[in-house]
Amino acid sequence: MDNWKVTGKWFFSTRTVAILAMVAVLALSACGDSDDADATPTEEPVVEKMTVGLIQGNWSSQMTLTEIANQVITEQLGYETTKLVADVTPGWAAICNEEAHLAVEAWLPSRLAEIQPFIDKGCFEMGGSNFDGGIGWYVPRYLVQGDGALAPGLKSVDQLNDYWELFENPEHPGMGELIGGEVGWIDQPQDISRIKGYDLNYYRSNQGEVVILSLIKSKTLREEPFLTYMWTPHSIFAQVDLVQLEEPNPYVEGECFVEEEPGYTCAHPPFDVHTAVSPVLKTGAPDVYNFINNMSVGGQGVSDIMYQTDILERDFVEVATEWIAEHQAEIDEWIKG
């Protein structure tokens, strides 16, 4: 034997000690493996995404563009969203109060005066140009062109005094009527200034968009004369053949409509519709920030959308879903930044 006993005590050989040590190590190792197998794996902490608030207006282009943003943010970027239905001006305050974080239509320069204080406070930034367009005074084509035209010589706004009787409203006898937008719309002070500047025998009636469109359609069906303010892009141009009156003088930034009282003989300023995005998204949802900051549907795109919703009377959610499917490559680029 390799082991021996002296005076009542056991002594072990070097070989035996080595074997026992190896057995002990293997036993400890086995215990360790068992503990590792039974241990709960360490999980990565779940980062909860913020809820993104969107401002939604009540006109067709804004509703559909907001829904496009909503679907991309929820279905492709994985955020929950809320929609705050609000008129334009209260919407800016809502973003400032962090009740919402973005809007898809900020009309510049027409809304700049009301937007600038919120920009100065750091409430939101102007994103990229979503689409552009313009404002003008329009008459139906049958009034100025073709057989039976009642005003074939009417081509420019400075000729309107020669034809005021065609646009007379019995409720305001002795003056021609310019069908204008609601009180508070940017065209209101500009239209009044232009009427004064050109010394036109006209008054501006204050109408909402629904009433304006109803008047245009009903008068067109009866082939009656009318003079109306209108903006592009808009679906009405796919329904009614309108002619914009020429402008003798272009709009010049810093020279036109800078004061309330004087009358100006300037064209309406062109506009550029931007997105508005809260700086909160830059850190809280950077992919949403990139997407909204780069969103650019374009004037033709908005016209196509409005044709679907306003003329074909399709649901705006359905139109938004279809638009996304047809423009996914563009959306991917917007998200990348």
Image (cartoon, helix red, strand yellow):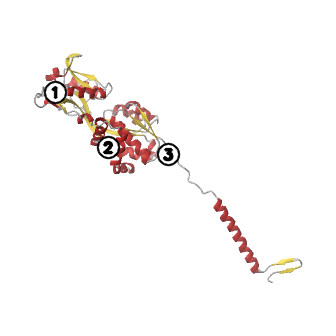
Label 3 is placed on what type of residue?
Lys
230 over 43 or under it: above or below: above
285 over 212 or under it: above or below: below
Secondary structure beneath disc 1? helix
The reply to whether dot 1 and dot 3 touch (C-beta < 8 Å) is no
- Residue 30, given in percent of the width and then of the height, sits at 68, 67
Q: Is residue 78 left or right of residue 10?
A: left
Secondary structure beneath disc 2? loop
Looking at the image, the residue that sits furthest to the right is 7
Quarter of image, res 237: top left
Please report the residue visible at 67 percent of the width from the left and 64 percent of the height from the top.
32
The reply to whether dot 2 and dot 3 touch (C-beta < 8 Å) is no
Q: Earlier in the sequence, mark 2 or mark 1?
A: 1
- Residue 257, given in percent of the width and then of the height, sits at 26, 29
Please report the residue visible at 42 percent of the width from the left and 45 percent of the height from the top.
73
Q: Which residue is mark 2?
A: 297
Label 2 is placed on what type of residue?
Val
Q: Is residue 18 left or right of residue 151?
A: right
Quarter of image, res 315: top left
Q: Of discs 1 and 3, which sits in the foreground? A: 3
Looking at the image, the residue that sits furthest to the left is 147
Q: Which residue is mark 3?
A: 49
Secondary structure beneath disc 3? loop
Residue 158, which numbered label?
A: 1
215 over 8 or under it: above or below: above
